[in-house]
Every structure is written in C-alpha cells, then in structure tokens.
Amino acid sequence: MDYFSGRIFSVTKIIWLIIFLMIMNTVKSSTPEDPIKCSSSSSSSSSGVLKKKSNCTITNFIGAFPDRTTCRAAEAFYPTTEAELVSTVAYATLAKKKVKVVTRHSHSLTKLVCPDGDEGLVISTKYLDRVLNVNASAMTMTVESGMMLRQLIEEAAKANMALPSSPYWWGLTVGGMLGTGAPGSSLWGLGSQVHDYVIQLRIVSPAGPGEGYAKVRTLENGNPELDAAKVSLGVLGVISQVTLKLQPLFKRSVTYVTKSDSDIGDQAVRFGREHEFGDITWYPSQKQVIYRIDNRVDSSNTSGNGLYDFLGYRSLPSLVLLTIRTNEETREALEDINGKCIDGRLISTTFRTAAYGLTNDGILFTGYPVVGYQNRIQALGTCLDSPEDLRITTCPWDPRVKGIFYQVTTFSVALSQVKSFIADIQKLVTLEPKSLCGLDLYSGIFMRYVTTSSAFLGKQEDSIEFDFTYYRSKDPLQIAMFKYNGLPHWGKNRNVAFIGAINKFENADKFLKIKQIYDPLGLFSSKWTDQVLGLNKDGLSIMKEGCALEGLCICSEDVHCAPKKGYFCRPGKVYGKARVCAKQY
C-alpha cells in the first residue's frame, strides 16, 4: 500500500485493472507522433508527400536520449523514391552537411539519429516502405528500407512465405534492424538476426562531383562490403533496398513453463539448442524462470490458428499509466524495496495467468500449446495499430503522457561464459535478496539466443542476449561488459556499455576501412558514433555530477553518483573491480 494524494490505494487493484483492460483489448491507442519535429516546411514531391522541413529536433520513441540532450538539425527530408534519396544525399555532400537517418518511430535509444550540432540534416525513411519484388520460386523478397517489420511479415505471408526469425516488436523498420543488428531468439539455421537473412542490399553514400555527389552501391552475398553494410550503425550511408532470403510459411507451437532458477545456469546453455525459437524470462529476486518452449511444427498435420498479442505491447488508458508511474516514483522516493518486490510478483503472476497475451484462436486462451502460423506469432505491437483518440489511451511508453519511463541495458554474453555470468547475478541476489526486484516491474531479465554472424559488427560467438529494463542502474552491467567481455546491443544501451566495445570485434578494422571508402568526409558520422567506433579520443564518458546514475560514466568519485540522495561510489559487491553507485544507510 502507498500514500497518493493523501489517500491509500491498492496496487493490486490497479494491476488487475490493467490486465483486465489488456485482455479485453477494448482500448484504442493514440498513434505515435513523428520523432522529427520542425518549425517550418516547404517543397512537395509530385505525389504530394511533404519532402522537406526546417529547424528541427529529433528524438527517440521514449522521448529522451541516455544523456537527456536534445538533438537538432537544420533540415529534414522525406524522400519517397530512391531517386529522391540520391538527390538528398547529393545535396548534403555538395554542401558538406552532416547527415543522419531516422526511421518511422525511431526505436533506438542510443544517439544514432543525431547529427553533430544544429546545421546538419536528417533523412526520414517513413515513405520508403514498398515491396519491390517477390520471387516465390527463389523464396526472396525485395523491400525498401523504411518498411516496418509488421508490413514485411504481412507481405511475406501473402506470398505464403515467412521471415524465419525477427525481433518481437513489429514497429521496427528493415533499415533500423540492420543498422543496430536487432535479433529475435534462435540458434538454429542462420539464427535470429535479420541481417543474416540479407542476400542483397542497395546503399546510397556520398561521392565526388564526377558521380553527381552520391553513389548507389548494390552489394550481394560474397562481397565483403555486404558484411560491413549489414550492421552499419548508419555511418556508411542510407540503405535504400534490401533483399531477404525467406522460407515457406510455417507454424509454431508455444508453451510457457515456470520453474525454479536453481539450475538456470546449466539450462540456459542447453535450452536454445533444444528449442528453435526458445527464450527465457528470469526473475532473480523471485528465484523463478519462465521458459518459452517454442518450436516449428508441421503445418499440414498440426491444427491451430493461435495469435500472440503480448500484454506489454498493448495500449493502456493514460490515467492508468499516470497511476503506474506515480506509484513507481513513490516507491523510489520512499525507498520502498518491499513494495517493489510485491508489485513485481503481482505483475509476473498476472502476466502468467493471462498467458502473456497468447490465444488459441485469436480470441481466447484455452490452454497450452498454442499453435499458430509464423506471421501470427513472431512479432507484436497492437498499441501501434489503433486510431487516434486524443491520447485517452496510448502505448505505455508514449512520452506525450506521464507513463512508463525506463532505461535499458542490452548486451550479449558468449554461451561459454553464460553459466558464470548467471552465477554472479545469483550471488548478488544472495547478498541482497531484494536488490533486483526493480527488474520484476519490467518483466525481469529477458534472455534471447543469437548466433555468430558474418557481419563485421555482428556477434562474434553464439551468445545469449540479456535485456535489463529498470528504473535505476544495477551492478550486473559492469559484470557483463567488463568481466565477461559482453557485446553491446547497438540500439539499446547507455554510454558506459560502449566503452572499449569496438576492440571486441575482430573485424572492426575491416569495417572502418570500408567506412572510409564510402564516406571519406565522415558526413554520416557524428562525434558520438566516432566515440563508439574508437575514432574520437575524447571517449564516451561524460564526467559530471550524477553521471554514473545516468550511465554516462563509471564513477570514480561520490559526486558521480547522488550523495545527497544517499548514493556513493563503491566497489561492486560481486565483481570487486567494478565501481557502482550504492546506497549507504
């Protein structure tokens, strides 16, 4: 129980109200606004689509970059064809303007979309979202880079084909997934990363006057430059078109099983080999693990038309979101760790009771396994799928309302190191049993399987990708990144996760050589990407008051934490070489 506006209210009732609204799915969501906001506009293409805007700010889907700065650009362009895209890059090259690419919803938390200063320009791929070719016999599909994952899945299914694996959130774009190396979960076949299904792409980069100041390159399998462009952080140019190798449409069978975490170290290493699309959700403070047993089944002999509509990706009333956020802030202000643990158990229990949003026929859940076609199981995001309602309801993280506001740290740990890393987290929980209850408020630690990739900035070994979503940073970040040589997710991290990261990629030099060929003036780079790639001696740490709590530095002095709030810089309790902000009572 908490005090709110002078009255005691029941968190349990609120959570059950949320789940009821999710299950009934009666709410309609306000669609997200464009991440690019400009004060003036001019020029339209022949199709009438707005082509250029001026004096702009750029943000991400949650409305805040890790360092809380505002990114600006002098101009924003909205090309509708590859020819218009080429013209835009040529204009930027001739004017020697910094350029960044922004996707429809800007789902990267990191500053990949920010040009240096306020005189650069941004290119939105919002209107580059068409299917260009479908080859059913070759099982390939060519699309424009601004196509959202949801569209790609739907268009493939119309041709009786499927992308074998993908991220779970359907609001990502094809170009965005390639730029950040976003994965699903699988160690089978080519694995879970969309870029490993790319067999050809076209990319527009700066050029000299003899080539009209912009050049279109077509890269195919066997060309080492494709391995640079498949995960490029957007610093090689603008991806225009992508050809993907697909498979015949198939069905999956999904069952969630809850177990003790006593043997999770051993199970985590084996589980991904045993189940094609398996993943794991771990609640360390509850000593509980949710295993998703998820496998391909014979479509002709297995009945079922199941649907996965994950509860956390559905729209909610803004008033409910306000209550959730206020409750979380109150827990934090009162240092009510017991309350966080209670809330976390309630949330995990209600999600489990509601089968996480799975239904056997698209309406009702009648029991496991849930069998459905790949296009109805692999990705979700219905809060993007409803008409405007003046923000009475919206996605839980919509920055236009006071709702869920969080930080994410995502990194991969090689399978050979996973058991030891998990054991260290368990040691932390043993020392402080309630220390990770805050993770339970955001569905625990989410674990996906990713394979070794040929991409120069892709995964170096078969690994598990760990997602930590939280209100405030915890010790496992430094354990993973430094003790276990973890690799950062390029789109979901704070600055400290990228310190020294480029040195962990054995083909980084090859990537940087191609970057120099494609963009010798560095127009598609920024100070931030140069820091990430090890090209800027200033480094990624921003040493200032409170920087460690923001993930902008590793603390070396108490002031880097929040001593006025009782947080001081101390050695890690499990990994002694770490320096973390710890509460001192």
Image (tube, helix red, strand yellow):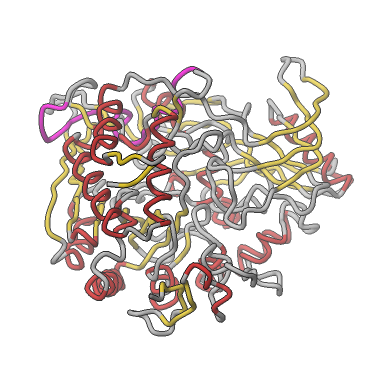
Nearest the viewer among 72 and 26 is 26
The residue lying furthest to the top in this view is 47
Instruction: Say whether residue 571 is left or right of residue 266.
Output: right
Nearest the viewer among 328 and 406 is 328
Q: How many numbered discs?
A: 0
Q: Residue at x 72, y 41 (%)?
A: 57
Q: Residue at x 25, y 76 (%)?
A: 431
Q: Residue at x 40, y 27 (%)?
A: 317
Instruction: Say whether residue 562 is left or right of residue 367.
Output: right
Quadrant of the rendering where the C terminus is positioned = bottom left
The residue lying furthest to the front in this view is 6
Instruction: Say whether residue 22 is left or right of residue 365.
Output: right
Is 471 above or below relative to 429?
Answer: above
Instruction: Say whether residue 3 is left or right of residue 570.
Output: left
Nearest the viewer among 463 and 54 is 54
Q: Is residue 375 magenta?
A: yes
- Is residue 243 among the parts visible in the rendering? no
Image quadrant in which you'd find residue 480: bottom left
Residue 527 point in image, percent of width and height: 72, 61
- Is residue 112 among the parts visible in the rendering? yes
Residue 399 point in image, percent of width and height: 54, 38
Is 486 above or below relative to 366?
Answer: below
Q: Is residue 137 magenta?
A: no
Write down the region rendered in magenta: 365-388
Q: Residue at x 74, y 45 (%)?
A: 72
Image quadrant in which you'd find residue 539: bottom right
Residue 188 point in image, percent of width and height: 28, 51
Residue 288 point in image, percent of width and height: 17, 57
